[in-house]
């Protein structure tokens, strides 16, 4: 998916087109209303790439859903425009999915583009307060994440999705716009009885937070609100109450106007937006929880202690 990412597109698309996969593959670029000439450039330089024009900025969730709704093959693979896939990336993702029929999603190993020997994400963690975290973030890519294994959730920046699983659990929640939509989807897939895998042989270099600066007000607002919506939709009551209480304690700390671990956030804005979307989320919760095939204990065994996450060196 692309929005005003012209500066990244050549490297991203050239790396994708260089991939090899038995039976071939189609490359689709969803453009979210770019104004930098991205569409004309891709159509002229990469005629093999099919372009879907959204016409406006639909966000990560709805933008990617445009392509996923048209998926006719067994798998669809999402890739941010600010990435460069290393050789063998695509074949490794497909091989991992083929190896496990109940794998709804397979995440690639993401490393920082400017520090390619450092992990950005080896899968998404569900923290014990309902937040999400990138497994392995900031750690050296020295072999400690070189095993194909099950993870809680996939980061949508570079992940494969199985069409059959999406048909059962649904696509990205478009009300999220961006952030937490990938963790929310993975949670729903797990409740429906599917698995999520990490494939270390599929390596992608990623310009982290190119779409919105890390720590920006835009990013913090959507992350804080969407975390609440995700928990409301998917979590058992006890976990939900614990998560909301944890958020409240953080916001109430003396001298702090924050929501969550980072300063500079607006609790009132987050709360008002959350309350406006809560009725629809409650309807989704009834549907998701009534159809779940997996006990909550199986989901919550993946919860990673928040204290341990905060204590990382």
Image: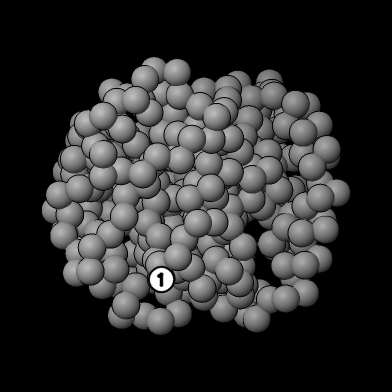
Mark 1: give few (<14), some (14-19) or many (20+) Cα within 10 Å.
few
Q: Residue furthest top?
A: 36
Residue 55 to residue 89: above or below: above
Q: x and y percent of residue 82 in the render?
A: 32, 34
Q: x and y percent of residue 218 in the render?
A: 58, 25
Q: x and y percent of residue 103 in the render?
A: 42, 74
Quarter of the image where the N terminus is located: top left
- Give residue 256's quadrant in the image: top right
Residue 116 to residue 304: above or below: above
Q: Observer-nearest residue: 207 or 169?
A: 169
- The answer to whether one can see residue 242 in this image is no
Q: x and y percent of residue 251 in the render?
A: 71, 33
Quarter of the image where the C terminus is located: top left
In the picture provided, is 180 more to the left or to the right than 92? right
- By what rule are the colours in the image chosen? one colour
Residue sitting at x 32%, y 49%? 27
Residue sitting at x 83%, y 38%? 276
In the picture provided, is 25 more to the left or to the right than 155? left
Q: Which residue is mark 1?
A: 74
Q: Observer-nearest residue: 270 or 33?
A: 33
Residue 135 to residue 254: above or below: below
Q: Observer-nearest residue: 43 or 92?
A: 43
Q: Secondary structure at mark 1?
A: loop
Q: Observer-nearest residue: 110 or 307?
A: 110
Residue sitting at x 16%, y 60%? 20
- The answer to whether one can see residue 55 in this image is yes
Residue sitting at x 53%, y 62%? 186
In the picture provided, is 158 more to the left or to the right than 90? right
């Amino acid at each position: 998916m692309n929005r005003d990412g012209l500066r990244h597109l050549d490297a991203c698309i050239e790396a994708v087109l260089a991939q090899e996969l038995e039976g071939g593959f189609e490359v689709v670029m969803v453009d979210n209303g770019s104004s930098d000439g991205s569409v004309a450039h891709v159509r002229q330089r990469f005629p093999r790439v099919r372009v879907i024009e959204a016409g406006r900025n639909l966000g990560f969730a709805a933008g990617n859903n445009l392509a996923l709704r048209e998926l006719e093959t067994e798998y669809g693979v999402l890739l941010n425009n600010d990435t460069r896939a290393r050789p063998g990336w695509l074949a490794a993702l497909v091989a991992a999915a083929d190896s496990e029929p109940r794998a709804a999603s397979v995440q690639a190993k993401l490393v920082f583009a400017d520090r390619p020997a450092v992990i950005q994400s080896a899968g998404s963690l569900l923290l014990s307060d309902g937040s999400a975290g990138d497994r392995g973030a900031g750690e050296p890519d020295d072999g400690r994440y070189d095993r194909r294994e099950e993870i809680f959730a996939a980061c949508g920046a570079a992940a494969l999705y199985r069409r059959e699983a999406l048909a059962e659990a649904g696509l990205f929640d478009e009300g999220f716009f961006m952030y937490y939509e990938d963790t929310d989807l993975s949670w729903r897939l797990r409740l429906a009885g599917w698995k999520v895998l990490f494939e270390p042989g599929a390596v992608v270099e990623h310009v982290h937070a190119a779409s919105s600066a890390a720590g920006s007000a835009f990013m913090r607002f959507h992350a804080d609100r969407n975390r609440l919506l995700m928990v409301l939709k998917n979590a058992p009551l006890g976990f939900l109450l614990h998560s909301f209480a944890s958020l409240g304690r953080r916001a109430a700390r003396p001298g702090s106007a924050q929501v969550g671990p980072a300063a500079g956030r607006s609790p009132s804005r987050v709360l008002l937006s959350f309350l406006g979307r809560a009725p629809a989320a409650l309807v989704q919760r009834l549907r998701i929880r009534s159809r779940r095939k997996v006990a909550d204990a199986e989901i919550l065994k993946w919860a990673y202690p928040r204290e341990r996450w905060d204590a990382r060196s």
